[in-house]
Each structure stands twice: as C-alpha cells, then as structure tokens.
Amino acid sequence: KKCGFGGILADDMGLGKTLQVLTFLLKEKQSGKSGDALRTLVVCPASLVYNWQREISRFAPALQVCSYTGDVRQRSDKRQTLMRHDVVLTTYRTLHNDIDFLSKQQFGIIVFDESQAFKTATSQIHEAVERLDGLHRMALSGTPVENNLNELWSLMNVLNPSTRIPPNWNNRACSNKATSTAGKTPQPRISPIGASNDRCVELGPIRMFTND
C-alpha cells in the first residue's frame, strides 16, 4: 500500500485470509484513518456475506459494518447511511446491478474476495469492478495456481489501474522470446557440477554429487 500497488493475498482455503484483512483494517483505524481513507468495500459471493459479518463481529467489533444486499427497495433504503460505515459488504451480483451508484462512491480500500469471479476480462463483472473508485485494492484468492497468465493479467489490471498492461502483452512476450532464441543452440538452465574431488553417485534417475 505504501508503494501505491494493489495485490493478491493468495492462500489456500481456511488459512485466515479474512482475518488478515480485518487485522489490516483495524491497524488502519487505530492509526487514525477515518472517513473516505478508511471506508472499505468488500465484494464477495453471496454465500460469504454472513461469514464476513460473523468474522467482523468476532474479531473486529470496533469496525462499523453494513451489508448492502437484498432487493431493490432494501438497497435503496440503505443508501442514505451506507457511507457512514467503516466496512460495506456487497455481492458481485449487487455490484453489477448497482454499479452506477457504487461507482460514484469513494472508498479508501476495496477488497475482492474470491476474485476469480472477474478473471475473464470481457465479462460484465470485470467491467463493473473496473469502474469502482478506490485508493487501494486487494484481492483474495484460494486458487491462484489454477489461473492462467491471461486471467492473472485480468486481476492485476483491476488491482493496479494506474499501471495497466496491454492485453496482448503475453503474445508479444512469447513472440519476442521466440525471435531472440531462433537459430541458437539451447543452453542448459543449470550448469553441470564437476570437480576433481567430486564423486557421482547413481540413484536411479537422480544424480547426487558428494565431496569425499
């Protein structure tokens, strides 16, 4: 955050990503942050809204939280007092439906839980999250290694809107690499180990070198 970059908190499920975020938000509040600088929008699947509410109530009761969910009338009634809270919880579907309203609100921090929801750059959800106004953005993902490079590019461009990478970056990088290595003899990635006092011990497909 000090460097102005957003990032992905990538851990397996059940390792406490939510708690790490809440710890960060509490530290921000204790350091004197308030108002727009502290106000946090958490976007998550509908099935995780209650989990966020429960974790905040249990571990961070000092944070004032509001759930911006429900039908059209319920959400409309909440808009008057929505921005008075430290944490606003909403779902990806609600974000998509109410993006015209939410994009006009300023948040200090935006958290995307289960961020694979907008890994496709051409999806409507991706277009919606790009329109949000936040000083700092972070994503939570329990399946980072399951995303290909284009999907990771999609996530990082949302998290770092000021340093956007062209959509054809991957193709150009591969093309440049292929051109630079064309006609050249492939070089080994690891140089062979060898010395006069090395003894090679055969262990099936594994070659171990020991010094005697």
Image (spheres, helix red, strand yellow):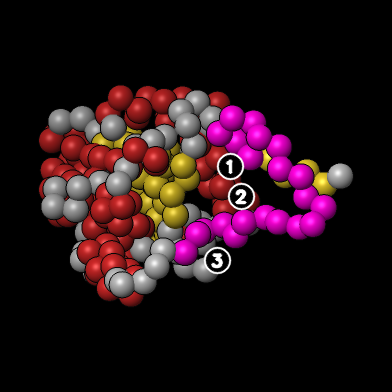
Verify CB contact (< 8 Å) between mark 2 and mark 1.
yes
Q: Label 1 belongs to which residue?
A: 23
> How far apart in space, not on screen, are marks 1 and 3 (Cα)?
17 Å
Q: Main secondary structure of the magenta part?
A: loop
Q: Quadrant of residue 78?
A: top left
Q: Earlier in the sequence, mark 2 or mark 3?
A: 3
Name the one closer to the observer, 104 or 142: 142
**Residue 27: which disc?**
2
Q: Quadrant of residue 97?
A: top left
> Magenta includes 136?
no
Give the position of the C terminus as an image quadrant. Answer: top right
Q: Is 162 placed above or below 55 here?
A: below
Q: Disc count in the image? A: 3
Q: Label 3 belongs to which residue?
A: 2
Q: Amino acid at mark 2?
A: Lys
User: Disc 2 or disc 3, which is closer to the eye?
Assistant: 3
Label 2 Cα neighbours within 10 Å, binned few <14 / some 14-19 / many ≥20: few
Q: Earlier in the sequence, mark 1 or mark 3?
A: 3
Name the one closer to the observer, 53 or 170: 170
Question: Quick check: 149 left or right of 171?
Answer: right
> How far apart in space, not on screen, are marks 2 and 1 (Cα)?
6 Å
